[in-house]
Image (cartoon, rainbow, N blue to C red):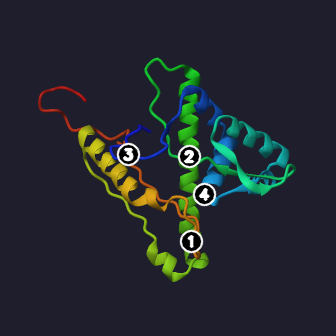
Amino acid sequence: MTDRHPTPIDDVRQLDADALKGLAHPLRVEIFDILAVYGPHTASGVAERVGESSGVTSYHLRQLAKHGFVREVEGRGTARERWWERTPGAIAVAPPAEDASAGERAASSTLMRHWEQSRSRLLGDFIARAETDLSKRWMLASSISWANLRLTAEQLEQLSQAWDAFSAEHLEPLRGRDEPGSRPVQIQFNAFPVIDGEPTPMTDGSDR
């Protein structure tokens, strides 16, 4: 959730309270993810994916555009059938400040929860359907991995910073490309403390 970018990444947007509330609606998060994962859609195309009317999705697309999360695709579509795309650039969501309102905290929690549900759904679809829907080459190119460690907060921060640096070097140059044979790919990296895990006692008696 924190905004860590030791290696400069262009267009990183730190969401303020107003923008956070504008995005933190279950259907808007879903629409935002559809455009991010699958590319440009019309309101009707989005409606087919989410099971809503085009009137509903059109309204939420306009609200997302109002807050700068999506934009119309230039030179595509008509006045009656507009195409929408995710606005380029990374989004950073920091933990709520100590003086954050209950509404801000709820918006942040809603946004992170629905993003995680979306990531889990995509991974679940891959696990369930990869063998029947993908070629062997795509299967061999894919990877699911994780590691369980005991780390201090400082070590976890260093690990997260290393991922940011790797992302800036290897992922950023691939953004915006759509070469023949390519398909949507999602790369997931989660690093967080296990909330109900017991911390190792500090030798000086302090508790961090």
- Circle nearer the N terminus (3, 4): 3
Query: Residue reaching furthest right?
Result: 80
**Image vertical order of residue 178 relative to residue 19, above or below:** below
SS type, badge 3: loop
- Inspect this view and state whether residue 165 appears: yes
Q: Nearer the viewer, mark 1 or mark 4?
A: 1
- Circle nearer the N terminus (1, 4): 4
Query: Residue reaching furthest bottom?
Result: 136
Spatial distance from mark 1 to mark 2, Cα to Cα? 27 Å
| Residue at numbered disc 3 | 8
Spatial distance from mark 1 to mark 4, Cα to Cα? 16 Å
Mark 4 residue type: Val
Q: Residue sitting at 76 percent across and 57 percent down?
A: 76
The quadrant of the image that shows the C terminus is: top left
> In this orientation, which residue lies closer to the viewer: 24 or 9?
9
* Left or right: where 202 falls relative to 151: left
Residue 187: percent from the left, percent from the top? 47, 59
Tag shown at residue 36? none
Q: Residues within 10 Å of mark 4 (few under 14, many from 20)?
A: some
The quadrant of the image that shows the N terminus is: top left
**Image vertical order of residue 119 relative to residue 182, above or below:** above
Mark 1 residue type: Glu
Spatial distance from mark 2 to mark 4, Cα to Cα? 12 Å
| Residue at numbered disc 4 | 37
Mark 2 residue type: Trp
Query: Residue reaching furthest left?
Result: 204
| Residue at numbered disc 1 | 179
Tags 1 and 4 touching, CB below 8 Å: no
Spatial distance from mark 3 to mark 4, Cα to Cα? 24 Å
* Left or right: where 61 falls relative to 101: right
How many marks on residues? 4
| Residue at numbered disc 2 | 115
